Every structure is written in C-alpha cells, then in structure tokens.
Image: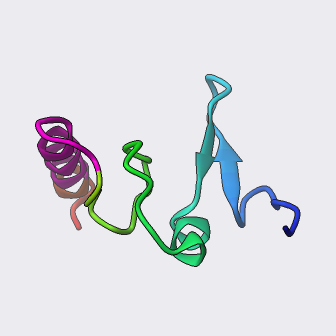
Amino acid sequence: MNELRETEDYTILPDGRLVFTASYLLRRGFCCGNGCMNCPYDHINVPEPFRTELLNKRKANEKAKGN
C-alpha cells in the first residue's frame, strides 16, 4: 500500500482529527459507511437517519459558502 501524503490524501483539523480528502476517498473506490466529512459517494452506505443528517449538513454548508 502506498504511503499517505498530507494535503493530498488527508488533512489534520485544528482539533487533531485526521480527515481524508475526497480525492483519496474516490481512489479508495467505495463509501465505507462511517460518514466521512468529504465523502464523494453521498454517504450511500451510512445508515438512516444519520445519512440524511449528513446530506442536510453538507447542503447547508454549500449554501452558506454560496455554491
């Protein structure tokens, strides 16, 4: 397995959490169901009602950023 590279594969949030990038998650090839912050698969394997909460939160963040 290839070594992970900071900023390309993950970032570390100010609170210390490691967050995978959407690019890394796309290369992985599937949604793991853990509710990853940058999930490019619309959290397809995350159980309800958590999936809907994540999608609504993402929509609200995009709206706040003006996207």
Give the residue displayed 44% in from the left and 47% down from the top.
36
Q: Observer-nearest residue: 45 or 20?
A: 45
Image quarter (top left, top right, bottom left or bottom right) of the C terminus: bottom left
Give the residue displayed 57% in from the left and 60% down from the top.
21
Q: In the rendered structure, does residue 56 fall within the stretch colored magenta?
A: yes
Q: Observer-nearest residue: 6 or 44?
A: 44
Across the whole image, how many numbered discs are drawn on residues? Answer: 0
Where residue 34 appears, x then y in whole percent? 41, 42
Give the residue displayed 21% in from the left and 62% down from the top.
66
Tell me where residue 43 sits by quadrant: bottom left
Up/down of 12 relative to 4, above or below? above
Where residue 52 appears, x then y in whole percent? 12, 45
Where residue 35 appears, x then y in whole percent? 37, 44
Taking the image as shown, residue 10 lies to the left or right of residue 25, namely: right
Most common SS among magenta residues: helix
Taking the image as shown, residue 43 lies to the left or right of residue 23, namely: left
Residues drawn in magenta: 46-61
- Among all residues in the image, which is located at the extreme top? 15
Image quarter (top left, top right, bottom left or bottom right) of the N terminus: bottom right
Q: Observer-nearest residue: 57 or 29?
A: 29
Give the residue displayed 45% in from the left and 68% down from the top.
30
Where residue 5 appears, x then y in whole percent? 82, 61
Coloration of the structure image: rainbow
Taking the image as shown, residue 5 lies to the left or right of residue 14, namely: right
Up/down of 30 relative to 17, above or below? below
